């Protein structure tokens, strides 16, 4: 049986994860956190890590800067809760923590109110975003060659010599499936599939995962998709398509931020499109941009010029400008990147 070999991983990743492991002694209290508006990778990696740490005899509590996504609550064990700093339980967990294990980000600004509470505590970071000058952490594993943070959590568990349980496998599968666009994006590797195979052997049911992750449209979410398709525009002179949503689009449809997941993919699915964009007007009048690249364009570089960041093929930024001005500015930057 072919297994994703733990001794085949890159030496830097291995030694980094080894140092993380050394900090996770049985009996210690760990707060698990991830970035604002946790996605499938953040939430799935956390859920898997929480199951595993509990199994190793640590106290593990999830405290995120924004509420744990409802759509991924099924990954939490019975009685396992996820808090925010506003909850007394979250506050207490952060006060009692020996260690913070931060997953899927190393950016202080993306940790919201959790960040200030890490002061004076050991902070372990396991992430796959390219490190930046503002990255934080006492022990940091930032490996952009990992398809998802879930891949690194998988390696961490295997490095500890532990088999992966069904519950852990479900979380890691959600993490990896969502961050690779269901094994379709450019970050998908042979090893991604080897790990997925291992997760299926641990009991993951791919169809029920598909239904849990993707077959979840609500009437409000569907209405948002309808509006997004109405607003979809394709440039005449560039291989670029974009969707612009007003603040009112979310408010009037009753759609949530979670319903925005994947909307940008509608622009990316158009034949010939190399850069897909989602513009979203925020309540304070600024504009949030999601960028996706299907070609050689480095959208992380574009996002950095706009004050944001991310991966080469998936990045984002918030611009303090109104929707129309933001569109013009971003399209200029994208034109530049494509030339
Ligand atoms: Mn991720």
Image: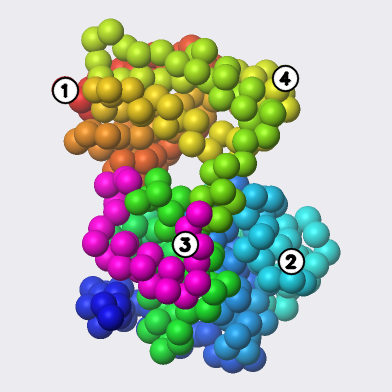
Disc 2 crowd, CA 10 A, few/some/many (<14, 14-19, 20+): some
Q: Is residue 165 left or right of residue 294?
A: right
Residue matched to label 3 = 173
Residue matched to label 2 = 81
Residue 15 can be seen in this image: yes
44 w.r.t. 281: above or below: below
The answer to whether residue 86 is magenta is: no
Secondary structure state at the residue bearing disc 2: loop
Residue matched to label 1 = 339
Secondary structure state at the residue bearing disc 4: helix
Q: Are marks 3 and 4 in contact (CB under 8 Å)?
A: no
Q: Earlier in the sequence, mark 3 or mark 4?
A: 3
Q: Quadrant of the C terminus?
A: top left
Between tags 2 and 3, which lies in front?
A: 3
Residues drawn in magenta: 184-207
Residue matched to label 4 = 252
Colour treatment of the image: rainbow
């Amino acid at each position: 049986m072919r297994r994703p070999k733990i001794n085949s991983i890159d030496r830097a990743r291995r030694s980094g994860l080894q140092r993380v492991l050394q900090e996770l002694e049985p009996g210690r209290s760990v707060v698990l956190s991830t970035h604002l508006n946790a996605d499938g990778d953040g939430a799935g990696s956390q859920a898997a890590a929480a199951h595993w740490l509990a199994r190793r005899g640590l106290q593990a509590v999830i405290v995120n800067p924004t509420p744990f996504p409802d759509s991924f609550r099924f990954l939490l064990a019975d009685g396992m809760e996820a808090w925010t700093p506003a909850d007394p339980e979250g506050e207490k967990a952060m006060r009692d923590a020996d260690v913070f294990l931060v997953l899927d980000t190393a950016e202080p600004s993306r940790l919201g109110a959790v960040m200030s509470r890490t002061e004076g505590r050991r902070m372990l970071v396991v992430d796959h975003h390219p490190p930046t000058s503002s990255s934080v952490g006492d022990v940091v594993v930032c490996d952009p060659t990992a398809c998802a943070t879930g891949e690194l959590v998988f390696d961490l568990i295997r490095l500890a010599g532990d088999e992966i349980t069904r519950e852990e496998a479900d979380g890691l599968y959600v993490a990896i499936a969502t961050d690779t666009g269901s094994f379709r994006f450019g970050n998908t590797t042979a090893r991604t599939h080897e790990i997925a195979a291992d997760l299926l052997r641990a009991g993951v049911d791919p169809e029920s995962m598909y239904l849990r992750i993707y077959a979840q449209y609500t009437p409000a979410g569907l209405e948002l998709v309808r509006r997004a398709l109405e607003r979809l525009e394709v440039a005449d002179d560039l291989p670029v398509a974009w969707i612009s949503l007003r603040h009112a689009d979310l408010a009037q449809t009753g759609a949530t931020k979670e319903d925005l997941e994947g909307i940008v993919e509608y622009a990316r699915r158009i034949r010939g499109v190399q850069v897909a964009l989602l513009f979203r007007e925020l309540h304070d009048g600024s504009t949030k941009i999601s960028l996706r690249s299907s070609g050689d364009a480095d959208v992380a570089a574009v996002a950095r010029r706009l004050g944001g960041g991310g991966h080469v093929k998936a990045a984002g930024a918030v611009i303090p400008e109104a929707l129309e001005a933001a569109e013009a500015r971003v399209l200029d930057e994208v034109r530049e990147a494509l030339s």
